[in-house]
Amino acid sequence: RDIKRTPTVVLMGLDSSGKSTLLFMLQTGVVMDTSPTVGFNVATLDLNKKTALTVWDVGGQAKMMANWKYYLEGCKAMVFVVDSSDRARIGEAQKALKKVLSDDNMKGIPLMVLANKKDLPNSMNIREVSNQLELPSYKDRAWEIQACSGLKGMGLQQAFLSVAKLIK
Ligand code: GDP
């Protein structure tokens, strides 16, 4: 595969939103015991015969925020992972998302929000997550939201196929 022609998708989200777990599940179909991402993982995903995506998991801890800009260059789509069971941090997630999308490199770049941990009984539905993240205010880009569970492997394949479709 010509790696340069493989669209780059940047995967972001606050720490503990479930980025490592879902990346690992996508790659291997197995549950991994993880600790919050400190640096970043890189994965190449074969979605189907035609589509491969390079995903950069760039973490979400406050100290990483300063480095975000670097990863956004040449990015074709943003996948933002949010812990839909964490009402206490949804405001923090909203601010982080807004900040990252305001970067010059992100102009018009499509957004896929993964409302993760939908297996938890108290998780917010996509309508609630969408409103909390103020997604309707993003009018200058294509965006979608899908519920998923990285832990159970629910909704991941569909979500990344949709991401592939969002990329022009
Ligand atoms: P990261 O910091 O964003 O990479 O988050 P991790 O992948 O390390 O996940 C943080 C914690 O949430 C871990 O204890 C995971 O087992 C847990 N977790 C991740 N995804 C899910 C999920 O879909 N459902 C549930 N119930 N827990 C999850």
Image (tube, rainbow, N blue to C red):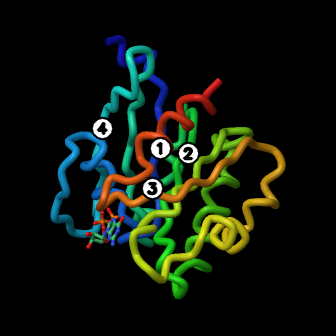
Report the number of discs.
4
Q: Are marks 1 and 3 in contact (CB under 8 Å)?
A: no
Q: Is residue 73 above or below residue 34?
A: above
Q: Nearer the viewer, residue 154 or 38?
A: 154
Q: Work out which quarter of the rendered image holds the N terminus and state it.
A: top left
Measured in 3D between alpha carbons, the distance from the residue under mark 1 to the one under mark 3, in whole angstroms, is 13 Å
Q: Which mark is residue 43?
A: 4
Query: Residue tagged by mark 2?
Result: 78
| Disc 4 CB within 8 Å of nearest ligand 1 atom | no
Report helix, strand or loop for mark 3: loop
Q: Nearer the viewer, residue 120 or 138?
A: 120
The amino acid marked with disc number 3 is Asn
User: Who comes first in sequence, dot 2 or dot 3?
Assistant: 3
Query: Residue tagged by mark 3?
Result: 67
In the rendering, at what x and y percent does residue 150 appear?
34, 57
Q: Work out which quarter of the rendered image holds the C terminus and state it.
A: top right
Side of 37 relative to 48 (left or right): left
Q: Residue at x 49, y 54 (%)?
A: 68
Q: Residue at x 31, y 52 (%)?
A: 40
